[in-house]
Image (cartoon, coloured by chain):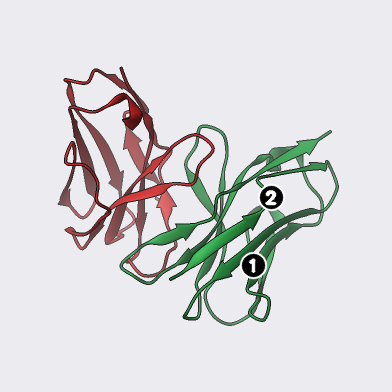
Chain colours: A green, B red
Amino acid sequence: AQSVTQLGSHVSVSEGALVLLRCNYSSSVPPYLFWYVQYPNQGLQLLLKYTTGATLVKGINGFEAEFKKSETSFHLTKPSAHMSDAAEYFCSVSDYQGGKLIFGQGTELSVKP
Amino acid sequence: DTEVTQTPKHLVMGMTNKKSLKCEQHMGHRAMYWYKQKAKKPPELMFVYSYEKLSINESVPSRFSPECPNSSLLNLHLHALQPEDSALYLCASSRDSYTGELFFGEGSRLTVL
């Protein structure tokens, strides 16, 4: 069965600093991996996805993530944090069973001025 | 049109009331979902409709009753809810029920008194 672990329930960075949000997954089959972002009082928005092909995927708002099969990781990065990046970030894996997405527990990103 | 629209945005109801949440998408997606989200937690899958047929029910209590009148609409009928059912209810859609790339609405915040 698939599972997702996000390391760190809360990450705080200064504006302009590197953002690194960690995600490790467990999957018995080649995974489809996703990062979603949720701003306060809103729904979730897809940041980026990995299905097949290039292991470095670029998403919206300057975020990118690298699929590392050997480390079973899919960490999210952004070179320079902006105040508007403050939000909850969820890593997820598709379990191929008719639409079930397995979500991690989420990481709250705070950005200090 | 890349939006999933949910109404109402806020709903307060008593334990004996009957109410409904509505969701609409016009992206031609054939899978639609209901999720429940408590504060500071990841979304929990409740139901999946694929091609207008209920394909997944995650053992949700019968006081929640989903309905998919057509491929664009999804309803969640609520009856005899409990205070612990208070949460953000998110609707999502996807091209099919296998890719995991979900488009979420902004949610309906439900308070049960």
Identified by mark 1, the residue type is: Phe
The quarter in which the C terminus of chain A is drawn is: top right
Quarter of the figure with residue A102: bottom left
Q: Earlier in the sequence, mark 2 or mark 1?
A: 2
Q: Residues within 10 Å of mark 2 (few under 14, many from 20)?
A: some
Q: Position of residue A104 (x, y in %)?
A: 54, 55
Q: Residues within 10 Å of mark 1 (few under 14, many from 20)?
A: many
Q: Is the residue under label 1 in contact with that under label 2 (CB below 8 Å)?
A: no
Q: Chain of mark 2?
A: A
- Provide the residue designation for mark 1: A74
Identify the residue at image location x=83%, y=41%: A15
Q: Position of residue B24 (x, y in %)?
A: 28, 44
**Co-location on one chain, circles 2 and 1:** yes
Identify the residue at image location x=42%, y=57%: B102
Quarter of the figure with residue A72: bottom right
Q: Is residue B73 visible?
A: yes
Q: Which mark is residue B81?
A: none
Q: CA distance from mark 2 to mark 1?
A: 14 Å
Q: Is residue B2 visible?
A: no
Of helix, strand and loop, which one carries label 2? loop
- Count the marks: how many? 2
Of helix, strand and loop, which one carries label 1? strand
Above/below status of B85 relative to B28: above
Identify the residue at image location x=43%, y=71%: A1
Q: Is residue B41 left or right of residue B15?
A: right
Identified by mark 2, the residue type is: Gly
Which residue occupies the foreground of this view, A12 or A38?
Answer: A12
Identify the residue at image location x=41%, y=69%: A95
- Provide the residue designation for mark 2: A8
Q: Chain of mark 1?
A: A
